[in-house]
Amino acid sequence: LNELIIYLNNIPVLFDLFISIPENVQCNTRELNQVLADIKNVNVIDIQITPNVGRDIAPLLCTFGNKLKQYDYFAHLHTKKTLEDITLKDWREHILSHIMGSPAIVTQILNSISNNTGMVAPPDYSSCWDVSGWSSNLKTAQDIINKSSLNINLEKEYPVISFPQG
């Protein structure tokens, strides 16, 4: 959290902060609020305890989705705590430094989004990269496609993709 606060303090405009905490994680709300008090430019802080399913996407869409509709843009941050793979130990720092590493970087991204850029993501993290871009996600993506009305063979029609990692 202290690391994230350093990056959040690079946001040069007033913003609202939505935090999801998995229900299986012990959290001292009083201590959390004391730490969060160090964030500059934060307007509203909304903390929700969420089921630990869907990684970071379920809380984003299911818990905060309706609230986020009122915003012109938002940043989605995740702690990227990947303990099982040592090659990913620097992934979080790579992501955060490229999208929130300084007020100038955040300002540049905000200006870009204001000029009709749909999404900004950090450059690929080499430890996650494979030549196809799919990594282990091809089968899952194809299973989802197969359940839809679409008739797409991802491996044939999209053998290489560029996927925003983080």
Image (cartoon, rainbow, N blue to C red):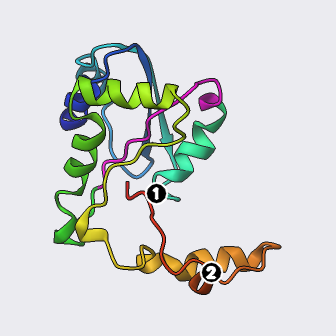
Query: Where does residue 88 sit, x and y in percent of width and height?
Result: 22, 65
Picture layout, residue 95 above or below residue 75:
below
User: Looking at the rendering, which quadrant does residue 65 occupy?
Assistant: top right
57 sits left or right of 100 in the view? right
Asked whether 75 falls inside the magenta stretch, the response is: yes
**Residue count near mark 1 (Cα–Cα under 10 Å), binned few <14, some 14–19, many ≥20:** few
**Residue 47 placement, left or right of 93:** right
Q: Residue at x 24, y 29 (%)?
A: 5
Tell me the residue at 24%/67% (across/down).
126
- Residue 35 in picture, x, y percent from top left: 23, 24
Q: Residue at x 28, y 34 (%)?
A: 100
Question: Which of the two discs, 1 and 2, labels the residue nearer the N terminus?
Answer: 1
Compare residues 38 and 141 and report the one nearer the observer: 141
- The answer to if 140 sits in the magenta stretch is no
The answer for how far apart the CA atoms under marks 1 and 2 are is 28 Å
Local crowd size for mark 2, using a 10 Å CA cut-off: few (<14), some (14–19), many (≥20): few
Which circle marks residue 163 in the picture?
none
Kind of residue sitting beneath label 2: Glu
Residue occupying image coordinates x 52% and y 52%: 57
- Badge 1 vs badge 2, beta-carbon distance below 8 Å: no
In the image, residue 120 sits, relative to residue 90, either above or below, namely: above
Whether residue 74 sits left or right of residue 122 in the image: it is right
> Residue 72, located in which quarter of the rendered image?
top right
Residue 155 falls left or right of residue 52: right
Question: Which residue is identified by label 1?
Answer: 55
Location of residue 58 in the rendering, given as x and y in whole percent from the top left corner:
56, 51
**Which residue is identified by label 2?**
157
Q: Name the amino acid, label 1.
A: Arg
Q: Which residues are magenta?
A: 67-80
In this rendering, the answer to whether 47 lies above or below 90 is above
